[in-house]
Amino acid sequence: MSLTAERQDGGKNRILIIGGTGYLGKYMAKASVSFGYPTSILVRPESLAPHSSKAGILQEFTHMGINILQGSLDDYESLANAFKQVDIIISTLAIPQHMDQLKIIRAIQEVGNIQRFLPSEFGCDVGRVKGLPPFQRVCDDKKTIRKAIEEAGIPHSFVSANCFGAYFVDYLLQPRRKPHLEEAVIYGFHDIKFECCAAVFNLEDDVAAFTIMVANDSRTLNKSVTCRPPGNIISQSELVSLWEKKTGTTLKRVFVSESELIKLSETLPHPDNAPVCVLHNVFVKGDQTNYEVGEEALEVSKLYPDYKYTPIEEFLEASVSAPRDIKLTSFA
C-alpha cells in the first residue's frame, strides 16, 4: 500500500473532520483516531454549551483522544485557525450545507498548508449520475464543489460510498421491528419475474475506514475512488430473499413501478420527494453498478485487499439477533 501518512517532520498526518458529530462524521472521526492519526473535529461554539445535544458525543470523543476545535463555516478566522493546525480535511456536511463548502475551499486556498481535501460526497459517483430533478440538483451541487476544488488547485480525493449499508437495511427491512415485516416493497418493477438493478451496500464503519485510507494514500491523490467491494453488490430482491432465509419468514412482495416513483418525485413536497429519487436512481437506473471501474475511478477493495470489510450477507446475519439502532434521516 503506497501511503503518504507522514508529514515531512516524521509525524503522522493530522486529520480534521468537518461535520464530525453528524451521522457519517461520527464514524469518520472514530475511524481516523483508531488508525492512529491525530484527529480533530470542528464544532460550532453553541455545541460546546454544557446542555447542548452534542455534549454526550463530544465527551466520548474527548475520552477517545479526539481534539475539539471551535469554529464555524460563517467565521472565516475560526476556519483558518483550525486549518493551520491540520494536514488533511474531510467534510461530512449534510446536503443543506454542501454549497457552504465553497467557504472551506476559500480558506484552504488562503492558509496554503492543506495536503488533501475530501469534500462531502459519500453517495453515488456524481460524475456518472443522471437522476430525477430533485436528486440531480444535489448531484449538480456536488459537481460544482468538485469543479471549484480542481480550479483552485487543491489536492483532493473524491470518495463515492454508494449506499450506507446499515441505513438502507434499516430503511428497507426494519430489522429492529418486532415482529418482523410481513411484506417487502420492491422498487422499480410490477412483476417478480423481473430483477431490479444491483446496488452497493457498504457498512458505515467500512466507508469511514476506507475514506481514512484513501485520504493518506498517494495513489488516490486527485483521483475519484468508489467503494464497490464484490461482497456488497446485491439487488433489492436478493437482499429480501437473504433476509427471508435468515429469519425463516416469507415476505409478500409489493412492487412500486418506475412510473409511480417518477410521479411521487413530481408531486411530493421537498424534501419528501428526495428519498424516492434516490430509490429510483439506485434500484431502477442502477447508477451504482452500471459502469466498469477503471483508472478514472479506483475501487477500494482492490486498493486495500488486506482490509476485512463486512459483506452485506454477514451484516444481515448479525442484524437478525442484534440489529443496530440507526437514527433515520433523509438519505438524499
Image (cartoon, rainbow, N blue to C red):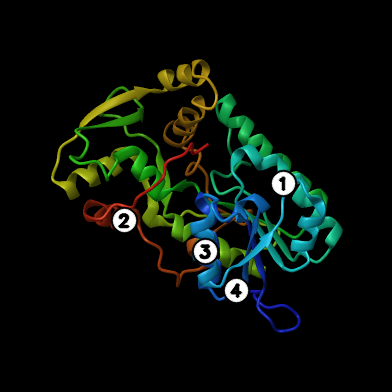
> Which structural element holds mark 1?
helix
Q: What separation in Å lies between label 2 and label 1 (alpha carbons)? A: 33 Å
Q: What separation in Å lies between label 2 and label 3 (alpha carbons)? A: 29 Å
Q: What separation in Å lies between label 3 and label 4 (alpha carbons)? A: 19 Å
Q: Nearer the viewer, mark 1 or mark 3?
A: 3
Task: Tell me the crowding category of disc 1: few under 14, some 14 to 19, or many 20 or more residues within 10 angstroms, Cα based.
Answer: many
Task: Tell me the crowding category of disc 4: few under 14, some 14 to 19, or many 20 or more residues within 10 angstroms, Cα based.
Answer: many
Q: Nearer the viewer, mark 2 or mark 1?
A: 1
Along the horizontal axis of the image, is 134 left or right of 115? left
> Which structural element holds mark 4?
loop
**Which residue is the site of mark 3?**
59
The type of residue carrying mark 1 is: Gln
Q: Which mark identifies residue 202?
A: none
Along the horizontal axis of the image, is 124 left or right of 89? left
**Which residue is the site of mark 2?**
315
Label whose residue precedes the other's in the sequence (2 or 4): 4
The type of residue carrying mark 3 is: Gln
Label whose residue precedes the other's in the sequence (2 or 1): 1
Q: Measuring 31% from the left and 22% from the top, which residue is drawn there? A: 190
**Which residue is the site of mark 1?**
101
Label whose residue precedes the other's in the sequence (3 or 4): 4
Q: What separation in Å lies between label 2 and label 4 (alpha carbons)? A: 27 Å
**Which residue is the site of mark 4?**
37
